[in-house]
Amino acid sequence: MFSRSSNKVASVVTIHSTFCATEASYAKDQEIYGQGERAELVYEVKRGAVRSYKVLSDGRRQISAFHLPHDIFGWEIGPTYRFTAEAVVDATVRVVRRQTLEYVATTDIGVTRNLLSIAMKELEHAENQMMLLGRKTSLERVAAFLLEMDERLPKSSVLALPMTRRDIADYLGVTVETVSRDLSQLRALGILRFAEDSQRRIVLDDRPKLQGLNVGPFA
Amino acid sequence: MFSRSSNKVASVVTIHSTFCATEASYAKDQEIYGQGERAELVYEVKRGAVRSYKVLSDGRRQISAFHLPHDIFGWEIGPTYRFTAEAVVDATVRVVRRQTLEYVATTDIGVTRNLLSIAMKELEHAENQMMLLGRKTSLERVAAFLLEMDERLPKSSVLALPMTRRDIADYLGVTVETVSRDLSQLRALGILRFAEDSQRRIVLDDRPKLQGLNVGPFA
DNA sequence: CGACTATTTGAGGCGTATCAAGAAGTGTGG
DNA sequence: CCACACTTCTTGATACGCCTCAAATAGTCG
C-alpha cells in the first residue's frame, strides 16, 4: 500500500528550544490525522510536504493548504481536527502534545501570542484563497499557485512541485484537466517549461508575465 | 449620496464591561474602513449589518463575511485592514482603539485568548467558505447561505435578509442572476416563499429539504 | 408621481467539467 | 536492466452550468 519510509520513527528533539517533541515520519499519501479525530497533537513539518483537506459526503475534496518545512499545522482550539492531513510525499514532522502547548500558554503570554500569530497567518491565507476560489479564472488560479509555490519552495532554477495535478486541482477548485490545460497554455505563452525528466519540475522563464496574470487587489 | 442616519454620533459605552468604547452609526452603504488603511480601531456590531470584502483591480468583489449584532470585526494583527468594511443597512457599532486592546492583552492573558478565539472562529468560517466556493454548485451555495442566515439572524417566522442579491452573489462567488434563479427554483420546489411586501423577506417552509441540499462533510 | 435601483426572467455564449483515449512517468518483480 | 502494471498527465470532443446581455417587473425614495 505505502512506499518506503516507516511510520513514527521516534527520537527526541525540541521545537523552538522550548518544547519536548517527538519526531515522526510518514510515507507518501499516509494519513497523519483525520477530520473529526480528537486533536491531541500539533505538528511542524521538518521535511517533505503535507496537505490539509475537507471532503464532502459525495467525495468532492477541497485542499485548504499545503504545509511545507517550518509550517505548523494541526493546531485546533476545539476538541477535534477540522481537516484530514496527509503526507504529499514522504515527510518528517515534529510532534508536540497540544496539552503541553496549552499548559505553557496559560502562563506564558509569548506562547499564546505565537499561537495567535499562527492562526492569523492561516486566516490571511484562507481569505486570499476565498478571493481566488470565488472570483478568479482557472488561468489566474494556476498562475497564483505557481507564484505561491515559487515563493515558498526552496529557491532554485526549477520549481520542484511535490504534489500531483489532482492535488493542485483540489487546491484551486478546478479539475485535473483544467490545471493541465492551463499549464500547457502557460508553456505555449513562453512563461514556463517542463524539465526533461518530470512534469512536476517546472522552470519559470518569465516571472513578470506570470505576475501579470495574477490580478491583485484594487488601489 | 447616503440616506438617513448620521455618521459617528458619539456616546460612551463599554465593551465586555472592560473597555471604554465609543459608539458610532453608519448609513447604508457607508464605508467604515478601507482595505489598506491603518488598522487603529476594532468594532463590534450593535445593530444592523456590515460586509467585509476585497476587490480586485478590475472590480471583481468577494465578500468574506457579513457581520451581525454581537460580531466583532476589524481586528488585525498587521498594520492595516485587509478588507473594506461597509454598512449593509444603517448600522450602529461599538468602537475601541486597537492600541487599548493590545495594551490590555500584553498583561491580561484572558483578553489575548479572547482575541485568539475570535481569530479561530473567523478561520473556521473562512475554511468552510473555501469548501463552498471551491466545490459546491450554485444551488448548494444558496442553500448554505439561507441556512447560515436562518441560524444567525433573529429567530422569526420570516428570514429578513438585510443584504441585496448582489451582496449575496459576491459572498457566494456567483452572479446576481444566478442567485435569483436559484431562489426561484427553491420557491418552485416549495422550500421557500417570498413575503408579500419584499423579496428580501423569505419564509422557509421546508428546512429539512433545504438542509438536504446543503451537502455536509464525509463520515 | 417619477426616477432610480433591485430583482426576475429569458436567450444565447463561454469557460470549465466530463468523458475518452493515448502518452508519459513510476514502481515492482523477474 | 527490462517488462509489466499502474498511476499520472495531456489532449481532444462534447456537455452543461453559470455568466453575459437584454428587457420587463417590482420596489424604494425623493
Image (spheres, coloured by chain):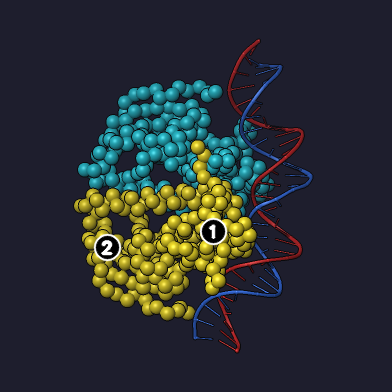
Chain colours: A cyan, B yellow, C red, D blue
Q: Earlier in the sequence, mark 2 or mark 1?
A: 2
Secondary structure under the numbered disc 2 in the rendered image: strand
Q: Residue at x 39, y 73 (%)?
A: B26
Residues packed near mark 1 inside 10 Å, few (<14), some (14 to 19) or many (20 plus): some
Q: Position of residue B198 (x, y in %)?
A: 54, 71
**Vertical side of B56 occupied by A113: above or below:** above
Residue A168 seen by the camera: no
Left or right, B203 with respect to B97, comes to right
- Left or right, A144 with reference to B8: right
Q: Quadrant of the N terminus of chain A?
A: top right
Residue A31 to residue A193: above or below: above
The residue that mark 2 highlights is B15
Q: Picture coordinates of residue B103 (x, y %)?
A: 23, 57
Residue A203 x/y as whole percent? 58, 41
Q: Which three-letter amino acid code belongs to the residue tagged 2?
A: Ile
- Foreground residue among A70 and A19: A19
Residue B42 visible to an observer of this rendering: yes
Chain identifier of the residue bearing label 1 in the image: B
Residue named by callout 1: B205
